[in-house]
Each structure stands twice: as structure tokens, then as C-alpha cells.
């Protein structure tokens, strides 16, 4: 195997002029309006007719000449159901500055690394979901990847996973994670800085708890201990900060990101968001306008069907996981046995029960809402007639509780209220 980033081709290829200088296809207003209607129906699922009207008017107003929209006719709107079966969707966060705000530096100041690589898995019965983070500095084998310019890139024995986006684009990152986990991943999305900023703003900001002061000169993140509602650039830099949390490593950055993501899920699922048409539509636009999507995901109805599958999953059944790793020179590698157990559970659609802690960048929120304690008598009427009765362990065991993972597998659920563990400049 070769570790050189070069395309392989069995024969020289004649490059057609049309491929580089072809005419742009003329926009078809009817196709555009069809997509608008699909978007309107998607938001209609969670927020009511008013959002569909806003979506239709907003985008259709920019189409010339105007046409009569299907939503203007009488009759009920078509229904989009939850996607059938399970879902594996890879979400990649790129650090590329191309097309981004100038405050992040010149467009050519960085490469195109996938500094964030997360796998969303939804079980086939839509009863549970997991979001699994792969550390950017994890050494993995990279398979042969198609070169977007033609030919094929050679496989490599051991490279950091965050080089795959540079090496062969989003398709290469997907192939790498498929080989690593044994899972089939039919959907993928690449998100840049602007996407994170737009999504956090669309929901009106994301509340995060900071346990100790966060100070990071690299991202300009300075947050005092306490609660903060973050959106736009502030939210993005909070997710990017590494020096300002935990021990300054990428591993503690992941657990800090999970603090934000769990709060984002709670915010999106809250009544104040789902009942606000403008917030729901803004969130839908933030997703579609700021992501590069795989072909079979680049369809509003598919996005909507995945969202519907997630909509009713209990917060405690949405688990954020950091894959188990061990330290090596210059990075980390998978702890193979624990790593395999994790993805065997995912492949089997078992609900995940974390064996480890929240990770070094997060800690439990001491001011978290306290759940009501169940009444034992209500669960077991016999307890009221025989107070001395000893519960039968076999009767209380729930076989659907899922796979309990090793303590090397850290994370939290969306129902867990956590705080970021800050790090000041004195400790850096």
C-alpha cells in the first residue's frame, strides 16, 4: 500500500473541453417550485399550515415568471411519513475557509480537513438513536477512494481520519468509516462554519452551562462560569474550542461539543421551537442552504422523513458517544475490542447504555432539573399489601434495556444536563 496522496489511473484520459467549460444548465422554474413545495410540506409536519405558506411564498417570490403553486389548490396537503427502517448518516464538519466569512482567515489558509466526523444512527423501529463521534486524530486505514478529478487514490495503511476529506472528498470519508465500523452508510452531509452558525441562530440560540471559566485565545472564546445562550459565531467558536476546555485535547473537545449538541436537541424538541413557524422554517433553510449533501440525501422529502423518524424518540434514548480509543504517539487508535462491541450493538439496533463518564470536557450540571421519583407502589401493587416483600430481579429486568458498553466508551444522552469543564489561560 502506498501512503502517497496521488491518483491512480490505468490509462491516460482525454479531458473534454466541455467538462471544464460547459454551459450552465438553464434553471427550470417548475423544478424550483416543486422543491419549494416539498420544503413547505416538510416544515408543515411539525409546525402547522402557516409555515408551509411562509415557505411557499418566500422561495416562490424569487422565481420568474411566477406560476400557480400546487398549495393554492383546495384539498389536504400530501403527508410525508417517517423514513422506513433504520438510518446511518455521516455528518462531517469541514475546517475549510472557502466561501466562509473573512474573519476566519483567507480562503487558502487551510486545507479541507474533516475536524468533526459523526455518525447518526436511528434504529429500524425508531425507538432509539445514537450520535457517534470519531476523534480527528484517530489513526485508521483508508481504503481506495475515487478521485473527483478521475482515477482512484491508493489505499493507505494508517492515516488520521481527518485527512480523508482532503484525500478523496466526502465519499472517501464515508468509505473509510464504513470499512472501520462494518456498517453501510447511504447518507452523508458536509457542514462548514456557516452551517453551524445558521442552525444555532435559527433556533434562537442554544443554552449551555459552563462549570469553570473557558479562555481560548485561538478561537476568541471567553466565557465565565454559568449559563450562556450561544448563537452564530459564538456558538461556532464554542464548538471549535480545544485549548479552553478539559485538558486541551481533541478528546475533551468532543465531550464539550456533546454538551452543546444535547442542549441543541432539547431546544429543537421543545415546544417553544416546534410551535414557532419562523424558527422551524429558519432551521430548515439553515440545513439545506449550508450543507453539501450526498445525492440520495439532497431531497427535502428524504430530509423530512429522517426528521420525522427522530421527532418522537425519547431524549434519554438519544445517546452521544465518543468511540473508545487508546493513546499512541501523535494521536489515538481504536480500543479494538470495546470499539467492536460498540458497533456490534449499533448494527443490531440495540439501545446503547454508556458504561463510562461524560468525558473530560463535561461534567454533570448540579442545577439540572430533578426527575420525579416513581412510586414503587404504583409499579408494584403487591408492595402495598406486603411491604416486606423482596422484589424479584427477574421481574424487574428489562431485556430491551440494550447493550451496556465498557467504561472506555464515554458520552451522555440528550436528556442529561451537563456543563463544560473550562480551562483558563493559566493552565495552558
Image (tube, grey):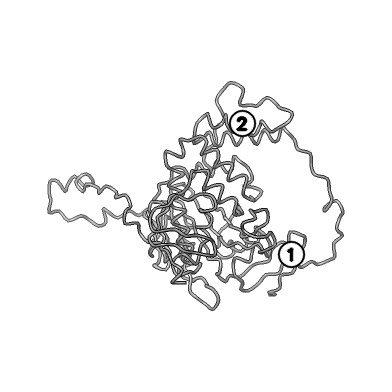
Residue drawn at x 60%, y 37% as measured from the top left: 39
Indicate the position of residue 253 as horizontal and vertical percent values: 48, 63
The image quadrant of residue 192 is bottom right
**Helix or strand or loop: what does disc 2 sit on?**
helix
Tag 2 residue = 56
* Residue with the most extreme bottom position: 329
The image quadrant of residue 149 is bottom right
Q: CA distance from mark 2 to mark 1?
A: 43 Å
Q: Give above or below for 16 relative to 385.
A: below
**5 vs 386, nearest the viewer:** 5
Residue drawn at x 39%, y 62% as measured from the top left: 212
In the rendered structure, which disc, 2 or 1, sits on the residue that comes first in sequence? 2
**Helix or strand or loop: what does disc 1 sit on?**
strand
Residue drawn at x 44%, y 49% as measured from the top left: 229
Tag 1 residue = 152
Q: Quadrant of the N terminus?
A: bottom right
Indicate the position of residue 427 as horizontal and vertical percent values: 44, 72
| Nearest-to-viewer mark from 2 and 1 | 2
**Left or right of residue 208, residue 148 in this image:** right
Packing grade of label 2 (10 A; few <14, some 14-19, many >=20) is many
| Whether label 2 touches label 1, CB < 8 Å | no
* Residue with the most extreme top position: 74
**378 vs 214, nearest the viewer:** 214
Indicate the position of residue 43 as horizontal and vertical percent values: 54, 36
Indicate the position of residue 31 as horizontal and vertical percent values: 70, 35
Any mark on residue 247, and which? Answer: none
Packing grade of label 1 (10 A; few <14, some 14-19, many >=20) is some
Residue drawn at x 84%, y 66% as measured from the top left: 11
Amino acid at each position: 500500500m502506498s501512503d502517497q496522496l496521488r491518483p491512480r489511473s490505468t490509462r491516460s484520459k482525454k479531458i473534454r473541453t466541455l467538462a471544464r467549460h460547459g454551459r450552465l444548465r438553464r434553471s427550470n422554474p417548475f423544478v424550483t417550485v416543486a422543491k419549494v413545495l416539498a420544503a413547505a410540506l416538510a416544515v408543515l409536519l411539525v409546525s402547522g399550515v402557516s409555515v408551509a405558506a411562509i415557505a411557499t411564498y418566500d422561495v416562490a417570490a424569487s422565481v420568474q415568471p411566477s406560476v400557480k403553486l400546487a398549495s393554492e389548490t383546495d384539498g389536504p396537503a400530501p403527508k410525508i411519513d417517517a423514513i422506513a427502517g433504520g438510518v446511518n448518516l455521516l455528518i462531517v464538519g469541514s475546517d475549510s475557509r472557502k466561501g466562509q466569512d473573512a474573519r476566519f482567515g483567507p480562503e487558502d489558509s487551510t486545507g479541507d480537513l474533516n475536524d468533526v466526523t459523526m455518525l447518526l444512527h436511528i434504529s429500524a423501529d425508531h425507538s432509539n438513536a445514537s450520535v457517534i463521534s470519531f476523534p480527528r486524530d484517530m489513526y485508521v486505514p483508508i481504503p481506495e477512494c475515487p478521485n473527483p478529478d478521475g482515477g482512484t487514490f491508493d489505499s493507505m495503511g494508517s492515516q488520521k481520519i481527518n485527512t480523508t476529506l482532503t484525500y478523496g472528498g466526502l465519499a472517501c470519508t464515508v468509505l473509510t468509516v464504513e470499512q472501520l465500523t462494518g456498517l453501510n452508510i447511504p447518507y452523508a452531509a458536509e457542514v462548514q462554519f456557516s452551517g453551524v452558525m445558521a442552525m444555532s441562530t435559527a433556533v434562537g440560540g442554544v443554552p449551555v452551562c459552563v462549570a469553570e471559566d473557558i479562555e481560548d485565545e485561538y478561537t476568541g472564546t471567553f466565557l465565565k462560569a454559568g449559563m450562556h445562550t450561544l448563537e452564530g459565531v459564538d456558538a461556532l467558536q464554542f464548538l471549535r474550542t480545544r485549548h479552553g476546555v478539559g485538558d486541551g485535547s481533541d478528546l475533551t473537545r468532543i465531550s464539550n461539543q456533546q454538551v452543546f449538541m444535547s442542549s441543541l436537541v432539547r431546544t429543537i424538541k421543545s415546544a417553544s421551537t416546534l410551535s414557532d413557524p419562523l424558527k422551524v422554517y429558519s432551521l430548515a433553510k439553515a440545513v439545506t442552504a449550508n450543507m453539501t449533501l450526498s445525492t440520495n440525501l439532497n431531497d427535502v422529502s428524504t430530509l423530512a422523513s429522517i426528521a420525522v423518524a427522530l421527532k418522537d424518540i425519547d431524549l434519554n434514548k438519544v445517546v452521544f458517544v465518543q468511540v473508545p480509543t487508546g493513546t499512541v504517539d501523535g494521536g489515538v487508535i481504536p480500543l479494538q475490542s470495546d470499539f467492536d462491541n460498540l458497533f456490534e450493538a449499533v448494527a443490531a439496533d440495540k439501545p446503547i447504555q454508556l458504561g463510562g463518564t461524560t468525558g473530560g470536557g463535561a461534567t454533570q450540571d448540579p442545577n439540572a432539573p430533578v426527575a420525579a421519583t416513581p412510586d414503587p407502589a404504583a409499579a408494584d401493587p403487591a408492595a402495598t399489601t406486603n411491604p416486606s416483600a423482596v422484589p424479584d430481579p427477574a421481574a424487574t429486568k428489562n431485556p430491551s434495556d440494550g447493550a451496556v458498553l465498557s467504561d472506555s466508551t464515554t458520552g451522555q444522552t440528550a436528556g442529561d444536563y451537563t456543563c463544560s469543564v473550562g480551562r483558563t489561560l493559566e493552565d495552558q
